[in-house]
Image: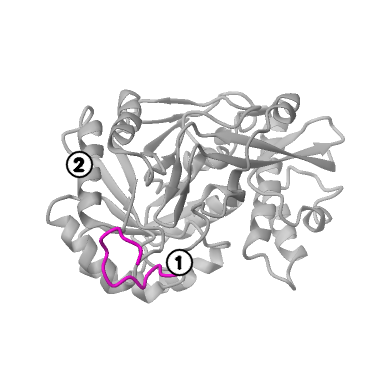
Amino acid sequence: MKITGYRTLTAQQHWRRSIGDVNGHITEAVTEVPIVILETDAGIEGVGLGSHADLARLFSAIDGEDPRGAAALFDRMLAQVFKSGHAGATYGGVATLDSAIWDIKAKAAGEPLWRLLGGRDRFVPGYASGLDIALDDDELASFYAEYAERGFVAGKLKGGLDLDTDLRRLAILSDALSRNSSRPGLMLDANESWQVKQAVRYVGALEEKVDLLWVEEPLRRWDAVGHARLSTAIRAAVATGENLTGVEQFRPLFEAGAPDVVQAGAVWGVSHLHRLALAAAARDLPISPVGYNANPAVAHVMTAVPNHLTTEVQSIDFAHGVLVDHEFIDGGIVLSDEPGAGIRIEEAVIEGARNGDGWADPAGPHMRPTRAGLRVVLDGVER
């Protein structure tokens, strides 16, 4: 079997709510979902979600290759961009092709991807994440109540600007999720908006009232020393890593003892997640994928590693034309039992369903505010 070509599509996820974080939000949010369909001479096609970055240059590394050599093809793509480097957007292209290759490999073997990777159980524990900075209190309660009905016992709040607001909203999460536990897991995601001492003071004040499971991305993603200092100053775990592109980028954090929970963005693909999970396991650290909805294939990896903690679930729906054979029950994800990653694409539906500008909105959460980390007073007011 040989890889012969690929085609691309862009679906749209209609969130039916506002989404965002401390850096900004999109009202009535629509986001784009890049898709790659990898073709073979055996007629088996693989689906990868995540990015269209640098595909033409990367494809030359796998063109004509046998997709069953998935791990080696991942390294061939990294070698293909050796001079310019694979960090940043290019890593998204590598990962999307990688996910499609693994989908083909599992389909060719006639096995679900979780089984091919060595998983025993197709259940993946998860937590609810509303991307909820712009939701009012009633919307917030409604969102987490829906997940509580599905058995979820943990949720993550977007915050970091105003202590009183975060305390009120964390109480709403706790109330909603208390349906299934008297001590639900509560996380706060600050999306790199603090400096070290801001984080120590803010989280310390929160912890006078709330038992936090973790604080996520409190500092800039590369600040290994700062994360380590913070971890020793608060009770909550420090979770970070979702925006690091390549296992090697975690080395300074590991050496500094920075992360208590190792995170990886779902758009970085199957091979990345698997290798990072094992690197974390060697240091007795748990791993937690972020943004499962952007690439559901990565949940399969979590069945086959010894240190999976929980996976972020942001929606029980997917983009128009993206059919994912997964269920959300008992506080997690039940993966497909069909060969491959359980993702099917309806190309005609995708082409006919485009509506909205997606991430083109300049006020969206991908834009870091000028004064992030430099605010004198953290009271929710931008001065």
Residue 144 rendering spot, x and y as whole percentages: 32, 33
**Magenta stretch mostly in which secondary structure?**
loop
**Which residue is most to the left?**
208
Q: Which mark is residue 359?
A: none
Residue 44 rendering spot, x and y as whole percentages: 78, 31
- Residue type indicated by callout 2: Ala
Q: Which mark is residue 171?
A: 2
Q: Quadrant of residue 255?
A: bottom left
Does residue 380 show up magenta in the picture?
yes
Read off the magenta span: 370-383
Q: Quadrant of residue 341?
A: top right
Viewer-closest of 143 and 254? 143
- Residue located at (39% from left, 60% from top): 217
Which residue does the numbered mark 1 point to in the structure image? 221
Does residue 272 show up magenta in the picture?
no
- Residue type indicated by callout 1: Arg
